[in-house]
Amino acid sequence: MPDFPFRPLGPGTAPVPPLALGSWNTWDRMSESDAVAMIRRASSAGAGFFDVAYYNMGPHAENSKTDILFGRALRASGVARDEVFLCGKLWLWDWPNQSFRSQLEESLDRAGLDRFDAVVVGDYAAPPDLPRLIADVDELVAEGLIGSWGINNWVIDDTREALRVAASASAAPPTFAQLKYSIARRSMAEGEPYGELFRDGVLALQASDVFEGGVLLGRVPQRKIGADVGGIRERIAQAAPAVARVADRFGVSPAQLAIAFCLALPATANVLFGASRLEQLEANLAA
């Protein structure tokens, strides 16, 4: 990450660190002392952006404690709240039966926080009621419980409609899209029509699943990893040797190459990755 500029997480927002640490299957895979060291190091290195989610709904009904563990480690680290950027998640799997407000309050309480700087509204099985969704999120923004919001792998027509509804209601619009993006999974972020929204500055990109759960790095995952949208993971696995060869020519690791590739896209505000060991973080910081 040498000298990489901070970019806004969408229009009207403050610049954020280019690297973001995910929470799914991370903080519950290390000791508290290691978690404290990770938070301190990331914050001091200008990578103090942390994804903090309560994974207990829909396909993520795991009763995870990773958010609780992160909150404990953040408090123990001594890093001030204003020195980090915290991004939460709101799920659509049981919304509106489980309201955004109740989800947010529970998530904040579990992590011992008072607000999120941003939230990602998750994906869905059926198109949501967008006017209601926009109104619900806007209420949380107006109360200062969240600073801004983005979408996670939404169908483009729904993203465009959300932008239109927000504009017509003078409500807070989504400012970024968290999309799966990597060397071997490029079409959604680079292709049309998301590419048009990025080029026009309507949205920023938060690149996620950049290692494809380790598959892009030639590993065989021993844990649950993200969904294989489009059914292309076998081809991604086949691309891993080529990624390793290119990385070797540049004198970097495949992970560093994967991060640098995503950061090279002008639309990318930051890259979200998982790290459960300090040496992984150090290596990624050098991308």
Image: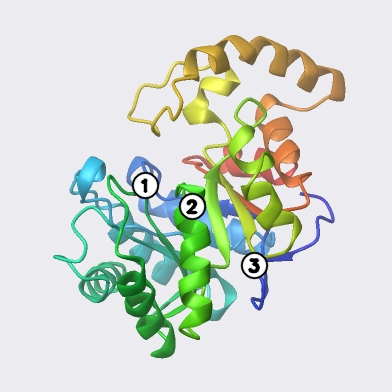
Task: Tell me which label, 1 or 2, sits earlier in the chain.
Answer: 1
Q: Is residue 128 above or below residue 231?
A: below
| Cα distance in 3D space between marks 3 and 1 | 34 Å
Dot 3, crowdedness within 10 Å: few (<14), some or many (≥20)? many
Q: Is residue 227 above or below residue 106?
A: above
User: Amino acid type of disc 1?
Assistant: Ser
User: Amino acid type of disc 3?
Assistant: Gly
Which residue was labeled with disc 3? Answer: 10
Secondary element under disc 1, as helix, strand or loop, is: loop
Q: Which mark is residue 157?
A: 2
Q: Position of residue 65 (x, y in %)?
A: 25, 53
Q: Position of residue 30 (x, y in %)?
A: 38, 43
Secondary element under disc 2, as helix, strand or loop, is: helix
Are circles 3 and 1 on residues that touch, CB within 8 Å? no
Q: Quadrant of residue 273?
A: top right
Q: Which mark is residue 31?
A: 1
Describe residue 67's horizontal placement relative to residue 211 as left or right: left
Q: How many marks?
A: 3
Q: Which mark is residue 242?
A: none
Residue located at (69% from left, 62% from top): 46
Residue lying farthest to the bottom in this orientation: 143
**Front residue of 121 and 128:** 128
The answer to whether residue 167 is visible is yes
Q: Is residue 172 above or below residue 94?
A: below
Describe residue 23's horizontal placement relative to residue 254 as left or right: left
Q: Position of residue 98 (x, y in %)?
A: 16, 66
Describe residue 197's horizontal placement relative to residue 61 as left or right: right
Which numbered disc, 1 or 2, marks the residue closer to the eye? 2
